Image (cartoon, rainbow, N blue to C red):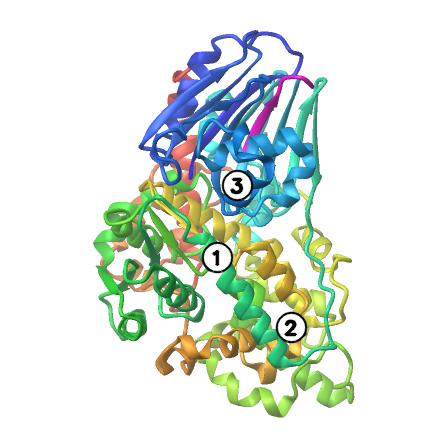
Amino acid sequence: MCGISGIVQLQRRPVQCLDRKLTVMNTLQAHRGPDGEGLWMHAHTMAGFAHRRLSIIDLQTGAQPIGTESGNWIVYNGELYNYIELREEIGANHFRTASDTEVVLRAYEKWGEDALPRLRGMFAFAIWDERQGKLFCARDRFGIKPFYYAVVNEIFYFSSEIKALIPFLPSVETNSEGLKDYLTFQYCLHGKTMFRGVEELQPAHQITVKNGGVYTSRYWQVYYDIDYSHTELYFQERLRETVMDSIRCHVRSDVPIGGYVSGGIDSSVVASLAADVCEGAYQGFTGKFTEGEGYDESEYARALAKYKGFELLELDMGVRDFIENIEKIMYHMDQPAAGPGILPQYMVARLAAKHRKVVLGGQGGDEIFGGYARYLVAYFEQCVRAAIDGTADNGYIVVTYQSIIPNLVTLREYKPMLQEFWREGLFDDADKRYFRLVNRAPLLGDEVKWKALGKYSPYEAFREIYLSDNIRSESYFDRMTHFDFKASLPALLQVEDRVCMAHGLESRVPLLDSRVVEMAATMPANVKFKNGTLKNGFKDAFADKLPDEIINRKSKMGFPVPFSDWVQNGAREFVTDIFSTRQARGRQYIDNSKVLEKLGRETKFGRNIWGYLCLEFWQRQFHDRAGEFKKMV
C-alpha cells in the first residue's frame, strides 16, 4: 500500500526538470508512504517514476521503484495475495527480492498483458517496458486502489491521488459533467472526475502509452450467469469456501492485522473469520457518536468481540471532531465525498493506525449480496404492481407481496425517501424507477445553477450501466445490485483508500475477491434476497460465525452521523461561516447564499447541506489554492 506517480513524454523527448517534477509528486503523496521514498528516471529522461512506501510485505528489500536486468521498471501500489504461488510458478531463481511488487513485474515479463487475469489482489501499477518502448498500467478489478491520469502538452502524468497532478494542469477548472454526476449520485460515472482534464482509470481496465497515443481497454468483467440448477444449501457451502479462502489470503502480512467492526453483517463476518485465522492476534476498532442511542451501534461490535474473544478499541466522536477534521478530510479526498460517513471512517482509521498498519473491512457486501434498503423499497413497489397486474411469475419478481411484509420494518428510518420515491412515476419502467431511488438531484433546488452545467444527462450514463448486457438474467434485483457494484462501490472504495492512507494505514477488503464476486454473480436473486431479507444468502452462510444479536438485527443503518443535529446546534456558526465567505458567494455553479437559507431545514439523515459543504471545501482546497500548487514546480 503506497503512493505511486510517474511522467512519460509521448514523443520520446526529454522531460524538462523531470527529477524536480517527480519529487513534487512524491511530496504531495507523502502521507501514503511514511516508510520510504524512491525515484527512477529513464536514461534519456523521457520517463520517470516516483514512489512513497508503506512497508507491509518484504520490509527489508521491497523498496521501489524496482527494475530488472532487461531494463523494465515498475512502480506499484497494493497487495498481491497470491504472490507466493506466482513466485513459485515463475521460478524463485528469477527474483532479487521477496516482495509482491517484483512478482507483478516478473509476471508481466513472462506473460505480458495476459498476466493480469492471474493477479489476485488490489493494485494499481505502471510498468516501463524498455524493449517495446511503452508504458503499461493497470488497475484491479474493483477499483480498490486508485489511478488518475492527465495528458498535458504531450506529457502523460499519472498518480494515486489527483492532488499530485494539479501542479501540471494548465488551470484548475471544474468538469461540469463530473459535477452534474456528483449532484445526481454523489459520485462520478465512467471515469470522469470533478477536475477538467483529469481522468480516472476505471476498475478492471488497463492503459498503454505508446507511439504518442494513450489507449485504454477492459481486461475483466463479471457476468451474471445465474445458476438455477443448485440448491440454496449448495450456494451457502460454496460461499463459505470462497470467503474463507479469501480471508486466508488477505491476512498474509509481515505486520500484525486488525479490522473495522461496525456491528453490521459484512464487517462482522470478516472480523469473525479473520480472528479465527489470526489465533488471538486480531484487534478490532469501532466508533460511536455521543448524541444518543440512534447514533451508537457499538453494542453489536462489543457482542462480536466478546463472542470471538478479540480485543476491541472504541472511539467516542462528537461535533468538535467534525469541526476540527472536515477540512483535512476534504484535502485527502481530492473530490467531494459521498455522505457524512466519511467522518467516522477517518476518525476510526486514525485510531487503528496507532495500533496496526493493516486492517480488514467489509466493503462490497452490500453490492454483491444485496444489502441496501433501497432494494427493499424497489421490490415492495414491484410486488404491489405484480399483485395488481397478475404478473408475479415473471423474472423481475423474486419475492411475493406476502413474504416481503415482515421485512418492511427495516424501512422505518427511510420514510422521507419513500415519500420522494412515490411522489411521481409509480409503476414506471424498472430502469426509471431505480434511477429515481439513486438520483439526489430532485431534492436540490435553485441553489444549483442548472443551466450553467450544460445538457449532459446523468440518466443516460446511468442507463448504460444499468442495462449492461453482461447481466444475463431478467431479475430487477440483479440489475440494481450490478449498477451499485459498478458505480457506487468504486466511490466508497475511494473513501476507504483516502481515509486510511491519510494515516499511513492499509485497508484490505476480503469480500472483494474475484472468486467471491464471480461465485456470487451466479447465485439466484431468490437466494440472496429470499422473502425480501437483505443479504439473506450471505447471512445464512455465516450464521454460526456470529452472535444472535447481529444475525437477528434489522436496524443496521451504516454508521449514522448526527450531521443535521450539528448544523442546528454545535456547528451552526462554523457551517454558516464556510458558506458566507466572499469566495463561497461567487461560485460558478452553486449559489451558496441560497444554501444558507436552507440550513436547519433538512430531515434527520438528509445529505443536501453535507453535499454542498463538501463541494465548498473542495473548491477552497484546490480551486482557491491552485496558485500554491503551481508554485511547487
Q: Secondary structure at mark 2?
A: loop
Q: Residue at x 22, y 58 (%)?
A: 570
Q: Secondary structure at mark 1?
A: loop
Which mark's residue is nearer the viewer, 1 or 2? Answer: 1
The image shows a total of numbered marks equal to: 3
| Cα–Cα span, label 2 and label 3 | 43 Å
Q: Report the amino acid beneath label 3.
A: Phe
Give the image location of residue 309, x and y in percent: 27, 70
Q: Residue at x 57, y 47 (%)?
A: 188
Q: Secondary structure at mark 3?
A: strand
Q: Report the amino acid beneath label 2.
A: Glu
Please report the bounds of the magenta region as a residue range: 125-132
Which mark's residue is nearer the viewer, 2 or 3? Answer: 3
Give the image location of residue 171, x and y in percent: 52, 23
Tag of residue 510: 1
Give the image location of residue 84, x and y in percent: 50, 43
Tag of residue 123: 3
Tell me the crowding category of disc 3: few under 14, some 14 to 19, or many 20 or more residues within 10 angstroms, Cα based: many
Q: Which badge, 3 or 1, comes first in the chain's sequence?
A: 3
Tag of residue 424: 2
Q: Which badge, 2 or 3, comes first in the chain's sequence?
A: 3
Identify whether 575 is placed above or below 546.
above
